[in-house]
């Protein structure tokens, strides 16, 4: 069994088992999760395909089963299913066990963040990973401000992001230290936290945030 496949299994193992917990009943919300995955994961997979073809990153064949779709290993495709399943599970767990609080952050502060990330994208447009991840992050804030601004003031949302960064660090450390995934230094700043490119933190933040946003949009449609 490939190393990357084992990592995927470990990512989803406990959330899958606990999906039938009577308090959470997470399995009942899988249709909402699928809605989010179809939109968000599809966008990130398209980016992944393009970035891989451009040589921004690559996958070590020694740690793969050897099956590819659109130039991506099957394990990479599974990653965009196992990770959102687990991250949204964390979100639902937080929503059940942690009382919501409203931060009341002025909307203009988030517009400032949008401008900041767009400026970074323009300045570092020649570093394709930096450019794309900062653009995606800016787009998340724009969409959320316009569609579901209350999410940005949600204590449960920000706590989920904080909690999700712990498994992110563990998983990314193994992916980049074994390595299962290798990066082209010309595509990003070249700075790393241990073995993890700094841009990966924005990549994770934007992706998890998008999954939660569209999951919440799907939930709202049923109310």
Image: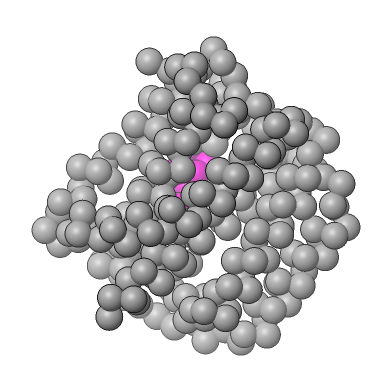
Tell me if I can see residue 200 in this picture. no
Place residue 24 in its image quadrant: bottom left
In this picture the colour scheme is one colour
Depth check: 101 or 88 in front?
88
| 94 relative to 148, above or below | above
Place residue 192 in its image quadrant: top right
Q: Quadrant of the C terminus?
A: bottom left
| 207 relative to 95, above or below | above
User: Residue placed at 28% from the left, 58% from the top?
Assistant: 31
User: Residue placed at 77% from the left, 52% from the top?
Assistant: 131
Q: Residue furthest front?
A: 70
Left or right: 142 with respect to 19? right
Depth check: 154 or 119 in front?
119
Place residue 116 in its image quadrant: bottom right
Give the image location of residue 6, x and y in percent. 38, 25
Left or right: 152 with respect to 18? right
Left or right: 163 with respect to 188? left
Q: Residue furthest top?
A: 62
Q: Which residues are magenta?
A: 163-170
Give the image location of residue 34, x and y in percent. 35, 54
| 41 relative to 75, above or below | below
Q: Quadrant of the N terminus?
A: top left
Residue 166 lies in magenta, yes or no? yes
Depth check: 48 or 111 in front?
48
Residue 6 lies in magenta, yes or no? no
């Amino acid at each position: 069994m490939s190393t990357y496949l084992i990592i995927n299994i470990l990512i989803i193992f406990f959330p899958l088992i606990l999906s039938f917990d009577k308090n959470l009943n997470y399995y009942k919300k899988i249709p909402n999760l699928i809605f989010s995955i179809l939109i968000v994961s599809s966008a990130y997979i398209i980016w992944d395909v393009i970035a891989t073809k451009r040589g921004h990153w690559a996958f070590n064949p020694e740690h793969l089963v050897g099956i590819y779709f659109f130039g991506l290993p099957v394990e990479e495709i599974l990653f965009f299913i196992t990770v959102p399943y687990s991250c949204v599970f964390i979100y639902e767990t937080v929503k059940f066990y942690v009382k919501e609080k409203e931060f009341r952050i002025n909307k203009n502060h988030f517009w400032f963040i949008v401008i900041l990330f767009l400026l970074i994208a323009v300045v570092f447009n020649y570093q394709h990973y930096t450019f794309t991840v900062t653009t995606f992050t800016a787009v998340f804030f724009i969409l959320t401000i316009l569609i579901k601004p209350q999410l940005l003031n949600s204590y449960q949302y920000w706590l989920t992001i904080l909690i999700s960064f712990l498994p992110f660090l563990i998983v990314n450390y193994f992916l980049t230290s074994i390595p299962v995934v290798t990066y082209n230094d010309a595509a990003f700043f070249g700075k790393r936290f241990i073995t993890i490119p700094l841009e990966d933190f924005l990549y994770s933040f934007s992706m998890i945030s998008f999954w939660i946003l569209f999951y919440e949009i799907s939930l709202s449609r049923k109310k």
